[in-house]
Image: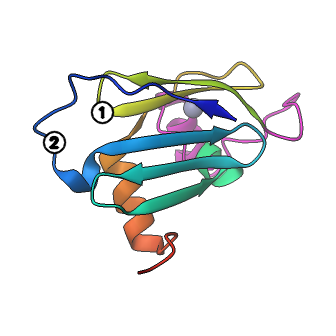
Amino acid sequence: MLSVRLPSYAENVDDRFEPLDIHVKRTEGVTITFADDFVAEFNLVALRLRCPCAECRSLRDRGEESWPRPGSPIPLEIATAEMHGAWGLSPTWNDGHTAGIYPFDALRNWADSEGTSPRG
Ligand SMILES: [Zn+2]
């Protein structure tokens, strides 16, 4: 388990999109608690398959999976993760891929649309 330190300058962000707490379980996924108490859990492979970097996007545009790629270590793991400014999470995957920055607003919208949070 890896805790990602949140920057103190995060402000003026809609509560829905403001992460209060981020837990990265290297072999399972990422859990984010947002400022409105919404808890979103993201599966590791699902996250990677949605990697927002240009390289992965172009693979998906060609109809290919962005993971696993030839030679990808399996199982997938997050080696480490950092905040990217106040707006995104930047994981480094165990195959060395680090280009994707996941904006919190996109993660939250994804979670809202898939109902990954325990309700109530
Ligand atoms: Zn990528």
Q: Position of residue 110 (x, y in %)?
A: 42, 61
Residue 69 is one of the magenta-drawn residues = yes
Residue 58 is one of the magenta-drawn residues = yes
Q: Which label belongs to residue 18?
A: none
Q: Which residue is mark 2?
A: 13
In what element is the residue under mark 1? Answer: loop
Is the C terminus in the top left, top right, bottom left or bottom right quadrant?
Answer: bottom left
Q: Which residues are magenta?
A: 49-76
N-terminal of the two: label 2 or label 1? 2
Q: Residue at x 70, y 35 (%)?
A: 1
Q: Amino acid at mark 1?
A: Trp
Q: Which residue is mark 1?
A: 87
Pointers 2 and 1 in contact (C-beta within 8 Å): yes
Camera-side residue: 45 or 38? 38
In what element is the residue under mark 2? Answer: loop
Q: Amino acid at mark 2?
A: Val
Q: Classify residue 7 by image quadrant.
A: top left
